[in-house]
Image (spheres, grey):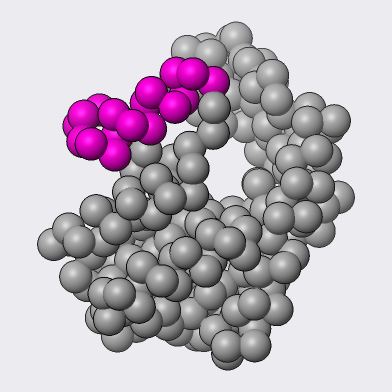
Amino acid sequence: MPAGKRLILMGPPGGGKGTQAKRLQERFGIVQLSTGDMLRAAVIAKTDVGMKAKAIMDAGKLVSDELIIAMIEQRIDSADCNNGFILDGFPRTVPQAKALDGLLVSKGIALDKVIEVTVPDAMLIERITGRFTCKKCGEGYHDKFKQPGRAGICDVCSGTEFTRRADDNEDTVVARLQAYHAQTAPLMPFYKQRGLLEVIDGNRPMDDVTNDIERVL
């Protein structure tokens, strides 16, 4: 893939989007930018944006689109973004997409592709609700797709206690998927009419998905 690619990677929770972003980062040296990670880093670094965001979050409120865009602006001005970047999970709404457009235009930057990794909801529910981890070392497992080699014993550390995330239940996952579809559905025509959107079937082995993403780039 040529240097200098600027991408948006979208996909539902549990769809493998984060894994694909990390693979692209490792293979091509383009930085993965997750708004959640950027927010945490800005708070730790005590930047102006980070301190404003912290005050909002401490008050139990949502960080505004304007503040997120300001944070993205600071981040893409960093030297490691000169070779390109992957926006992971942002924008989520059309107003965010328009605000991002305004930022990029002001900097003379154009998006190369917007990639949506799709997976059927039923498969996502199965993927997420079946997850569990070793309590001792954090190794991940799944009821159907990845059981320990010996029942009840972690393959990595031989621990015998396992745990599941409280929000990895069907009701919570369904609600998250409904929110994702409601927010992101309008983004598809927004980017499609500009010739940027590529839809990738994410319901396949990870290597096949990665190869397809590389092909469209």
- Residue 50 in the magenta stretch? The answer is yes
At x 53%, y 14%, the residue is 135
Question: Where is residue 208, by image quadrant?
Answer: bottom right
Which residue lies most toward the top here?
Answer: 161
Q: Main secondary structure of the magenta part?
A: helix
Q: Is residue 197 above or below residue 157?
A: below
At x 83%, y 32%, the residue is 170
User: As drawn, is 52 to the left or to the right of 8?
Assistant: left
User: As drawn, is 82 to the left or to the right of 176?
Assistant: left
Q: Position of residue 210 (x, y in %)?
A: 51, 69
- Screen quadrant of the N terminus: bottom left
- Residue 176 in the magenta stretch? The answer is no
Question: Where is residue 27, by image quadrant?
Answer: bottom left
- Screen quadrant of the C terminus: bottom left
Q: Position of residue 52 (x, y in %)?
A: 33, 32
User: As drawn, is 163 to the left or to the right of 112?
Assistant: right
In the foreground, 73 or 5: 73
Q: Position of residue 25 (x, y in %)?
A: 34, 62
Which residue lies most toward the left here?
Answer: 79
Q: Is residue 153 above or below residue 25?
A: above
At x 23%, y 36%, the residue is 48
Question: Where is residue 84, by image quadrant?
Answer: bottom left
Q: Position of residue 193 (x, y in %)?
A: 64, 88
At x 46%, y 25%, the residue is 57
Residue 143 in sight here: no
Count of marks, rendered view:
0
Residue 145 in sight here: yes
> What's drawn in magenta, residue-wise?
44-60
